[in-house]
Image: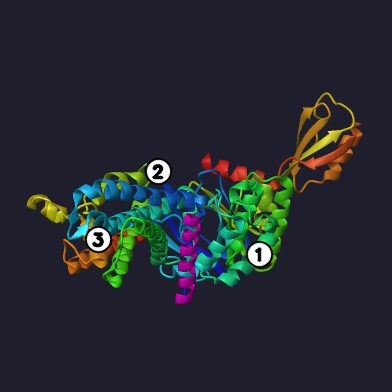
Amino acid sequence: MNWRMQFNAFSTIISKEVRRFTRIWVQTLIPPAITIALYFVIFGELIGRRVGEVGGFDYMEYIVPGLIMMSVITNSYSNVVSSFFSTKFQRSVEEMLVSPMPNYVVIWGFVLGGVARGMSVGAIVTGLSLFFAHLDVVNLWITISMVTLTAVLFSLGGFINAVYAKSFDDISVVPTFVLTPLTYLGGVFYSINMLPEFWATVSKINPIVYMVNGFRYGILGVSDISIGVAYGMVIVFILCLYGWAHWLLQRGVGIRQ
Amino acid sequence: MDTALQVSDLRKTYSGGFEALKGISFEVQSGDFMALLGPNGAGKSTTISIICSLVNKTSGKVMVYGHDIDTDFAAAKMNIGIVPQEFNFNQFEKVADILRTQAGYYGLDAATARQRTEKYLKLLGLWDKRDETSRMLSGGMKRRLMIARALVHEPRLLILDEPTAGVDIELRRSMWSFLKQLNREGTTIILTTHYLEEAEQLCRTIAIIDHGQIIEQSSMKAFLAKLDRETFILDLSADVDAAPQLEGARTELIDPHTLEVELSKQDSLNAVFARLSELGITVTSMRNKANRLEELFVSLVEGKQA
């Protein structure tokens, strides 16, 4: 398979993935927008007024980057985990297994599909946030690159979860018991500098802290973490998860007997 | 002639310890139409799944048109089209999207994918259904969709795992003629089926697999020639009380007006009719008791088990 053919295969997977989540847009694009709008109203408008300023910004402005990032993380992950698991469940994964596509084309095709959904939801949430807060993007390049890398990272996570999953319960375990707590404790609603020193240090084990702060730095110009460290952590996690995903496909774990 | 498929000492032991394949070897020549037969659980689907990379082999070698499925997998896979036993397409996708997506997986550009989709949906009589969701199709249409999907990248070797299971007679016959035409045009075909009449009608060579081993591989003609006895069912014009004695033949009365006669292939039927005439028995019609291949298959598999 030459490069041109591999590109055709890659773009086929992406367009199939985009077709899938846009076909069921009421399930994939609208609910996260409603959820985040409620966060804006409750945490930003109602509670935020009593909180005052955080990091030199209104509480509403401070939480907007974190809420956008939260929606990107959740949707990138859930798109890939549900899509790849349903190909296993319906056995249509065999269409890919019998084809000459290299494993990296399959992985990046699904990952980019997840990124497409994460970014679409992120764009909708950003649009909604403009009704509640004034956003001046300090560094567009950092903002775009950090959100894209984060979407890639969680799409890879969703892919690995789907490979191991044997039932629909298995694809909801990680989002419920790992992803949601890490996101809520990842500095979306507060600065980790507001925590006692011990908990601020513990928070730095959470990878989502680096992504939320990197993204917040791009938009607001403030971060609890050095931006270089944030990029480094995200890239290291991407490389590790990609290596893991590739190894799983190579071995046929969960998809070949 | 090229070798389309070469399977050497193929072994598969599943994680539970079940040894599905015990070192099978066979070859399929380019342009051949081969039947891979065997009882349920014999190892047919495992063999096919390994060839198509759906199951990991334990050991052995598979070459498709000279390409090793381990070291030259892309070239090997480009040459294979698979029609599996179970429906394995996305039930929520539209019919045309399923074909276009599969074409894309094989690296075809969008224009070629569209063109091939139209060609094969028309050939399989599904063009009118192109915008329907695949789960809305009937069972027969779903089978045809899987054949169209397997052909969309125009493979040289087509493998069909029980393609006519659960299909009505009319559709089965039309699928037979489609496959024969495809084979005439140069596509090598391997077919597994439980309908032995189907294998006898379509295939030129045969391999029988049982308990993970190849127990027979030859041309269909040579295989059928092994059958030295034949059984006929004779419908009689009037009831008889007992089966008449015929020299060199075994006779059995199924009911008062139906007689079963088994005789050697070398014996003349004329002698049978002459003797029946002498006894005042008139035969109104005659047919073979069973499919010839079925008789051989059963005797071979049962013989192996005994």
Cβ atoms under marks 1 and 2 closer than 8 Å:
no
Question: Mark 1 belongs to which amino acid?
Answer: Glu
- Relative to residue A50, is residue B53 drawn left or right? right
Inspect the image, locate mark 3, and give the three-letter code of the amino acid beneath it: Met
Q: CA distance from mark 3 to mark 1?
A: 47 Å
Judge the density around disc 3: few (<14), some (14-19), many (≥20) Cα neighbours within 10 Å: many
- Tag in front: 3 or 2: 3
Where in the figure is residue B18, as x and y percent of width and height?
40, 45
Depth check, front residue: A119 or B280: A119
Q: Chain of mark 1?
A: B
Q: Earlier in the sequence, mark 3 or mark 2?
A: 2
Residue kind at label 2, given as amino acid type = Phe
Give whichever of B110, A165 is nearer the camera. Answer: B110
Name the main secondary structure of what is drawn in magenta. Answer: helix
Asked whether residue B13 appears in the rendered view, the answer is no
User: Pointer 3: what residue?
Assistant: A211
Q: Closer to the camera, B46 or A105?
A: A105
User: Eyeballing the image, is A106 above or below A40?
Assistant: below
Q: Looking at the rendered structure, which numbered label has been put on residue B118?
A: 1
Secondary structure under badge 3? helix
User: Which range is magenta?
Assistant: A3-22
User: Badge 3 sits on which subunit?
Assistant: A
**Tag 2 residue:** A168
Residue B60 visible to the viewer: yes
